[in-house]
Amino acid sequence: MKKIIIALITFSIFSITACSSSGNQALKNESQDSLQTKLVKNKTTKSEVIRQFGSPSSTTTNGEGGDIYLYDMNNAKMSVINVIPIIGMLAGNTKTESRTLSIAFNKNGTVETWSFMSDDRNLNNGFIN
């Protein structure tokens, strides 16, 4: 019986790790290089962008009659250590990933310019980190 209780407690601790995801997960595996083949100046259209990445998080217009689409993705995953009493306070950490893609279209509805930012961090939030 004692082994079953220990196994259940261990399983519970490992299944409690907190994860948080928001935004467009299609950006998760993108990079500057991969986007260069997908976003070609004066060729890639709005409908192709939407087909590839889905609806943008937000849209705006530029002063030249074109639209700007903004896509973003944010993920956070806490280490299992965070939920272990005392040890979590001392050595806890959280891994974060963020991606931001901004695409400016000309008045003809094709890509004019784009920019991409990627940031992956391991945040040490324990006292001894």
Image (tube, rainbow, N blue to C red):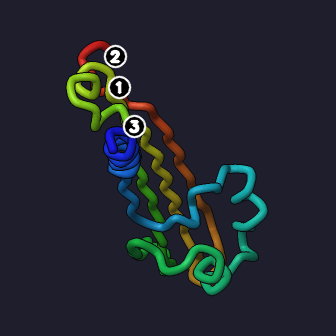
Q: Which mark is residue 110?
A: none
User: Can you tell which quarter of the image residue 2 is in?
Assistant: top left
View extreme (right): residue:
37
Residues at badges 3 and 2 in contact (C-beta under 8 Å)? no
Q: Which residue is mark 3?
A: 79
- Residue 41 is situated, as x and y percent measured from the top left of the image, at 72, 67
Say what secondary structure mark 2 lies in. loop
**Residue 4 seen:** yes
Mark 1 to mark 2 CA distance (whole Å):
6 Å
Q: Which residue is mark 2?
A: 129
- Residue 39 is situated, as x and y percent measured from the top left of the image, at 70, 67
User: Can you tell which quarter of the image residue 129 is in?
Assistant: top left
**24 or 122: nearer the viewer:** 122
Identify residue type, mark 3: Ser
Identify residue type, mark 1: Asn
User: Can you tell which quarter of the image residue 36 is in?
Assistant: bottom right
Q: Which residue is mark 1?
A: 124
Q: Nearer the viewer, mark 1 or mark 3?
A: 3
With respect to residue 43, does 74 lie above or below?
A: above
- Residue 75 is situated, as x and y percent measured from the top left of the image, at 42, 52
Residues at badges 1 and 2 in contact (C-beta under 8 Å)? yes
- Residue 61 is situated, as x and y percent measured from the top left of the image, at 42, 76
Mark 3 to mark 2 CA distance (whole Å):
13 Å
